[in-house]
Image (spheres, grey):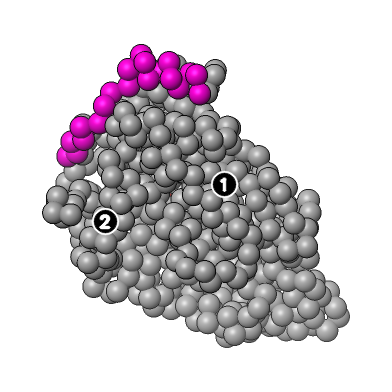
């Protein structure tokens, strides 16, 4: 509690700050007078750096996956001169063997895994993808489908010499229906560009991610990416209405319908959503876009404990209900990291926890009134000790940056061990406390943040460098802990290469065997994104 009236005692680098004390009265008076109870001011010159997600990796610094992890190359063929000649005929001028370009597609952006592919293919059409896959299947050549390469689990880069099949040139919007809001586009469209496209037409994409400037919609669907709007619009399993995928043998599966309702047989598109490119290459999607909200407000609040974060969430659901569009949280260590590594400034007074609440609605006055009532309630009851509110777009973006750029700040802190866990919300932070005390001085930072509204924690541990002993201290402990509390070991990032062997902590053995059978049926030679998502399958031998 700052005791400084409207401001929290920090330099006025915030959008409008209120502190615990006289705020209840101030908020009430302001509401009566029909004005905002906070003062707008500048934010201290924070600039969003999109480049982080697109920077070229320096591959020499990254240990090769096959040298760090116990993985053996499967008996796929190696790319020959004849193969290259065939690819060149199908994709004239779009077959790349240039070492510098390959360096970028072989390394994930976290710089944690590194393959050694010698070939990058850039199709433009579904037909080209089909011809390439039919050929690769006949030749027994492994293929790594790649979108924007912004994944967190090593799913988007080769492990050995798999051919990289990039969707970068498949970036065409096919159609947009301005009445229904249904967008049909190719898989390589960049999420941010799609957002701009639909926003110009008064709609929004139903998903938003920190990596929006680089990630491809096809990759988002293939990984069932969650992100910042899931609380409001639900997962891609609901908003993706249809998709087109090319199977390993080149067959084009056309499930690209644009219907809200279609109960005819099995919903095959669901197999490809979240399959991480192991069952087919998604080439086009049809997605339902909601109308662009007319009013968006953001509140950034400080809480004295995690119990307060939870009570604030509960109050928020009760009081903001239908206009609530995000409820995110971060701990104080996250704040220290964004402050020290990215030079962002904390707009409120220091607290053990921070929450970011977004409302999106159709009536600015109504939404503001609701938000005011909520803020008055949480401030006067002491659930929140300090806070700041933004209503205009630039300032909203600046506040979002504090949350969205935590990943970036962590990468500046050292080698990062990442865990993306679903847990019952009341248990969400216990694991962070547990891991922090378990690791003691061997870790540099142990942080917890994430999509609290979705019960999704991002537990990240940083250290000066990769260490097998630190990894062994975290894994499988963290997975055992999660399974014991009925959680999921991957809430939204998928399993990729790094988590595939831990699937058993979240899925029954029978479910894993069924997944392996589906994989064997759709991709009998296992050429699509090998070494990812599913553990090596002794069971398959008996099929
Ligand atoms: O870096 C992470 O662990 C999380 C990344 C992303 O899912 C986020 O919510 O910011
Ligand atoms: Zn996330």
Badge 2 or badge 1: first in the primary sequence: 1
Q: Residue at x 64, y 60 (%)?
A: 258
Magenta stretch: residue 272 in it?
no
Q: Quadrant of the C terminus?
A: bottom left
Answer whether residue 438 is visible to the viewer in this image: no
Q: Quadrant of the N terminus?
A: bottom right
Magenta stretch: residue 79 in it?
yes
Q: Residue at x 36, y 63 (%)?
A: 421
Q: Residue at x 28, y 23 (%)?
A: 78
| Rendering coords of residue 349 (x, y %) | 56, 64
Pointer 2: what residue? 517
Task: Indicate whether 464 appears above or below 103.
Answer: below
Residue 125 in which image quadrant: top right
| Rendering coords of residue 137 (x, y %) | 34, 34
Pointer 1: what residue? 284
Left or right of residue 206: residue 368? right
From this viewpoint, which residue is outermost toward the right? 33
| Rendering coords of residue 136 (x, y %) | 36, 31
Q: Which residues are magenta?
A: 70-90
Left or right of residue 537: residue 367? right
Nearer to us in this view, 22 or 414: 414
């Amino acid at each position: 509690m700052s005791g400084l009236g409207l401001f929290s005692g920090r330099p006025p680098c915030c959008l409008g700050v209120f502190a615990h004390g006289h705020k209840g009265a101030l908020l009430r008076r302001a509401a009566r007078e029909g004005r905002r109870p906070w003062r707008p001011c500048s934010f201290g010159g924070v600039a969003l750096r999109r480049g982080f997600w697109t920077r070229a990796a320096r591959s020499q610094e990254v240990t090769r996956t096959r040298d760090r992890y116990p993985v053996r190359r499967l008996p796929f063929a190696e790319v020959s001169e004849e193969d290259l000649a065939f690819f060149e005929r199908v994709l004239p001028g779009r077959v790349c063997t240039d070492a510098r370009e390959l360096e970028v597609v072989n390394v994930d952006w976290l710089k944690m895994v590194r393959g050694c592919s010698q070939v990058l293919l850039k199709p433009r059409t579904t037909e080209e993808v089909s011809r390439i896959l039919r050929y690769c299947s006949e030749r027994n050549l492994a293929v790594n489908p790649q979108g924007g390469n912004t994944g967190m689990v090593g799913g988007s880069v080769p492990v050995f010499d798999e051919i990289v099949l990039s969707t970068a040139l498949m970036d065409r919007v096919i159609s947009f229906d301005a009445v229904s809001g249904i967008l049909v586009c190719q898989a390589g469209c960049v999420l941010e560009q799609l957002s701009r496209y639909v926003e110009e037409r008064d709609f929004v994409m139903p998903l938003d991610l920190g990596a929006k400037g680089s990630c491809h919609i096809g990759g988002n669907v293939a990984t069932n990416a969650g992100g910042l709007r899931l609380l409001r619009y639900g997962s891609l399993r609901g908003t993706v209405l249809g998709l087109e995928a090319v199977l390993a043998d080149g067959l084009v599966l056309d499930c690209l319908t644009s219907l809200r309702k279609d109960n005819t047989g099995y919903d095959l598109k669901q197999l490809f959503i979240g399959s991480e490119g192991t069952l087919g290459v998604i080439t086009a999607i049809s997605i339902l876009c909601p109308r662009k909200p007319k009013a968006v407000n953001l509140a950034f609040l400080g809480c004295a404990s995690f119990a307060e974060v939870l009570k604030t969430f509960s109050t928020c659901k009760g009081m903001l209900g239908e206009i609530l569009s995000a409820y995110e949280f971060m701990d104080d260590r996250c704040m220290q990291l964004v402050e020290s590594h990215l030079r962002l400034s904390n707009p409120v007074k220091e607290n053990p926890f921070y929450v970011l609440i977004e409302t999106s609605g159709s009536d600015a006055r109504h939404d503001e009134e609701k938000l005011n009532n909520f803020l008055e309630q949480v401030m006067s009851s002491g659930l929140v000790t300090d806070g700041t509110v933004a209503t205009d777009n630039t300032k909203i973006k600046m506040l979002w940056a504090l949350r969205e750029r935590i990943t970036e700040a962590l990468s500046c802190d050292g080698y990062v061990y990442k865990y993306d866990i679903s847990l019952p919300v009341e248990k969400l932070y216990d694991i962070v406390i547990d891991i922090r005390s378990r690791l003691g001085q061997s870790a540099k930072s142990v942080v917890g943040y994430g999509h609290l509204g979705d019960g999704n924690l991002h537990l990240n541990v940083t250290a000066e460098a990769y260490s097998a002993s630190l990894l062994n201290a975290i894994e499988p402990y963290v997975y055992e802990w999660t399974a014991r509390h009925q959680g999921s070991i991957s809430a939204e990032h998928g399993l990729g290469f790094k988590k595939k062997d831990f699937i058993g902590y979240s899925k029954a053995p029978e479910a894993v065997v069924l997944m392996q059978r589906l994989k064997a049926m759709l991709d009998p030679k296992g050429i699509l994104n090998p070494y990812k998502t599913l553990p090596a399958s002794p069971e398959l031998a008996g099929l």
